[in-house]
């Protein structure tokens, strides 16, 4: 306890959010990467910028809710366009990503007193993590984490094959939407910490590093959770110690694990081949 | 042994399809399909590429919404109640190589799809999976990532998956698509064996007419509609089939049969 006493409270809050959101993003990320939804996650993160700008425009002091809502809107737009047009998913997402960024920047540039916010949301700012954000993160993490664990099997089956999942009685449409909803909420709430530009890395890098070492899905999930937790914790601590921005520190911590895992897997995989 | 569709009572019917119509991309693919599959039979579904065989199976299990028509499985029109009795092996399974699910995990998903398999690894589950895999001669694949399997290996795993919950109806959509030609014949023998041992109704989509002769008790030739049905001898000799295929069908031809462009793409 006393080690924490001389650490500033904002740092503790950032640490708390990081160790909660890190594993959660990493767990979601196992399915995001396997379902090729990394770009999707990036798009909804960028969609948040338009939400933030709109929130300020409408006079919100704290744009969290407009941010989450607009990200959800972008997610819904992707799904709708995918179903009702012949456009490629990549095209749809590139369109919505650049559209929401452009909209957000224009609105923020018009609001003279909010121009500084752009930098803050693009790159993340632990100073902006308030006590309410900590509670929100903890409660959300508990709820979403519990939901994810009860849905691991249907999600794994859905990822392997939607058709087989359907025949096995999984309500695939519903589960798809629920997954997108959960991903959107988690990603947009992690923006505070990592920033719009880097937030997807917390979803992508831990499962990728875990994939290097794992031999089955269960191992990948466990390793990914651990790496997400480590990345969040090590990143915030490093950020405090060396006075570097928190988001990039978390990302670099995850990248370091990724490199180690890659090297380890190469050494590891070479063994059975040579014998 | 000749069958007449009307002499059987409703309880004998495994699948009944009435006037099923499906349009895909503005094209009428199924134009009023009628089928009554009897319980316990191994039924072959044949037809040229694009004749709607896959679409028909997908419509039966609810993966394809029909424009109109009626599908009943064991007399049940509510799919939610019928599906637990059905095993389905799709024609293609687009598995992402980056998805690291092992065969063991994949099969466990079938056994406990509503609970999470995460923390438990029960001995009896393990035994059950090993026995099920051994039946198809694929025991050694249990700890391989499913995305790394060859076409033939994957088909075996998919059949094991479909059989795990002891279904009463097994739908196989070109199960030999990924199997190399020498292995094909023994693969069909394996399916015939599964059919006999598990006493289930099997619907098998196939290009391989010699297989149809050896294993099927009833044949449907599909081309948008059912253009011909009956015993293998009857259907194979029908002029309509020769027309539909545009080739001469030689009975009892076990080797050197020709394949449509759909066969044997996967190594
Ligand atoms: N999603 C789709 N959209 C448009 N056309 C489709 C779609 N799926 C299948 N088709 C078309 O439907 C026809 C029947 O396909 P299919 O049922 O797969 O035939 P088969 O299995 O007998 O080879 C084909 O001509 C195919 O091009
Ligand atoms: Mg087909």
Image (cartoon, coloured by chain):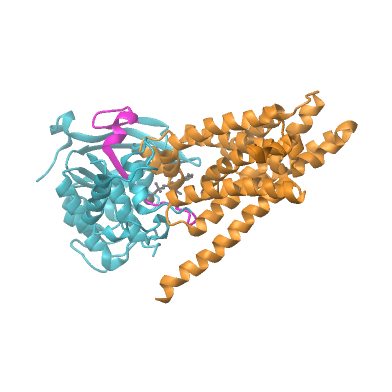
Chain colours: A orange, B cyan
Of all residues shown, which one is farthest toward the right? Answer: A112
Is residue B78 highlighted in magenta? yes
Most extreme residue toward the bottom is A274
Q: At 31% across and 35% down in the image, what residue appears? A: B83
Image-based side of B25 in relation to A255, left or right: left
Residue at 63% from the left image edge and 29% from the top image edge: A136
Q: Is residue A206 left or right of residue A123?
A: left
Please state which of residues A164 and A33 is positioned toward the viewer in this rendering. A33
Residue B6: quadrant of the picture: top left
From the viewer's side, name the closer residue of B138 and A140.
A140
Q: Is residue A34 magenta?
A: no
From the viewer's perspective, tell me whether residue B162 is left or right of residue A201.
Answer: left
User: In this view, which residue lies farthest toward the left?
Assistant: B1
Can you say which quadrant of the picture contains the N terminus of chain A?
A: top right
- Screen quadrant of the C terminus of chain A: bottom left
Q: Nearer the viewer, residue B242 or A171?
A: A171
Q: Is residue B93 visible?
A: yes
Which span is picked out in magenta?
B70-98
Q: Residue A129: where, in percent of width, then height?
A: 72, 34
- Whole-percent x, y for residue A97 in the image: 71, 42
- Residue B176 higher or lower than B231, as above or below: below
Please indicate whether residue A198 sits to the left or right of residue B34 in the image: right
């Amino acid at each position: 306890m006393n080690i924490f006493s001389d650490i500033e409270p904002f740092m503790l809050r950032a640490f708390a959010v990081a160790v909660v959101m890190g594993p959660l993003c990493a767990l979601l990320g196992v399915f995001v990467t396997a379902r090729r939804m990394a770009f999707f996650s990036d798009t909804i993160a960028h969609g948040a910028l338009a939400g933030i700008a709109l929130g300020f425009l409408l006079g919100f002091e704290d744009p969290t809710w407009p941010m989450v809502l607009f990200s959800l809107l972008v997610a819904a737009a992707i799904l709708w366009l995918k179903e009702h047009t012949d456009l490629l998913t990549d095209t749809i997402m590139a369109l919505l990503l650049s559209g929401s960024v452009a909209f957000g920047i224009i609105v923020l540039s018009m609001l003279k007193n909010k121009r500084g916010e752009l930098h803050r949301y693009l790159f993340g700012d632990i100073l902006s993590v308030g006590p309410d954000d900590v509670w929100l993160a903890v409660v959300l993490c508990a709820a979403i984490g519990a939901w994810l664990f009860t849905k691991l099997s249907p999600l794994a089956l859905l990822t392997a094959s939607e058709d087989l999942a359907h025949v096995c009685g999984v309500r695939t449409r519903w589960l798809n939407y629920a997954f997108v909803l959960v991903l959107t909420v988690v990603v947009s709430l992690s923006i505070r910490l990592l920033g719009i530009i880097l937030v997807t890395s917390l979803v992508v890098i831990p499962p990728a590093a875990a994939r290097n070492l794992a031999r089955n899905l269960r191992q990948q999930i466990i390793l990914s959770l651990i790496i997400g937790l480590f990345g969040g914790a090590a990143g915030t601590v490093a950020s405090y110690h060396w006075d570097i921005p928190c988001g990039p520190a978390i990302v670099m911590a995850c990248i370091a694990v990724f490199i180690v895992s890659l090297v380890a897997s190469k050494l590891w995989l070479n063994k059975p081949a040579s014998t | 042994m000749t069958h007449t569709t009307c002499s059987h009572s409703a309880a004998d019917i495994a699948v009944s399809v009435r006037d099923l119509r499906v349009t895909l991309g503005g094209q009428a693919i199924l134009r009023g399909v009628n089928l009554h599959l009897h319980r316990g039979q191994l039924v072959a579904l044949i037809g040229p590429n694009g004749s709607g065989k896959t679409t028909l199976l997908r419509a039966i299990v609810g993966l394809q919404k029909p424009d109109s028509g009626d599908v009943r499985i064991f007399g049940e029109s509510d799919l939610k109640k019928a599906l637990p009795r059905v095993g389905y092996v799709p024609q293609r399974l687009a598995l992402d190589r980056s998805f690291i699910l092992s065969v063991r995990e994949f099969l466990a998903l079938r056994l406990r799809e509503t609970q999470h398999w995460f923390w438990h690894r029960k001995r009896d589950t393990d035994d059950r999976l090993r026995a099920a895999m051994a039946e198809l001669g694929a025991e050694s694949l249990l700890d391989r990532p499913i995305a790394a399997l060859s076409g033939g290996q994957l088909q075996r795993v998919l059949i094991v998956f479909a059989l795990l919950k002891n279904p009463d109806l097994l739908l196989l959509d070109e199960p030999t698509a990924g199997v190399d030609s020498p292995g094909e014949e023994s693969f069909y023998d394996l399916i015939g064996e599964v059919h006999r041992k598990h006493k289930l109704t099997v619907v098998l989509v196939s290009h391989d007419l010699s297989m149809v002769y050896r294993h099927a008790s009833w044949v449907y030739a599909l081309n948008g509609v059912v253009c011909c049905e009956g015993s293998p001898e009857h259907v194979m000799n029908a002029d309509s089939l020769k027309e539909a295929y545009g080739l001469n069908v030689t009975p009892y031809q076990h080797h050197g049969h020709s394949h449509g462009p759909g066969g044997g793409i996967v190594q």
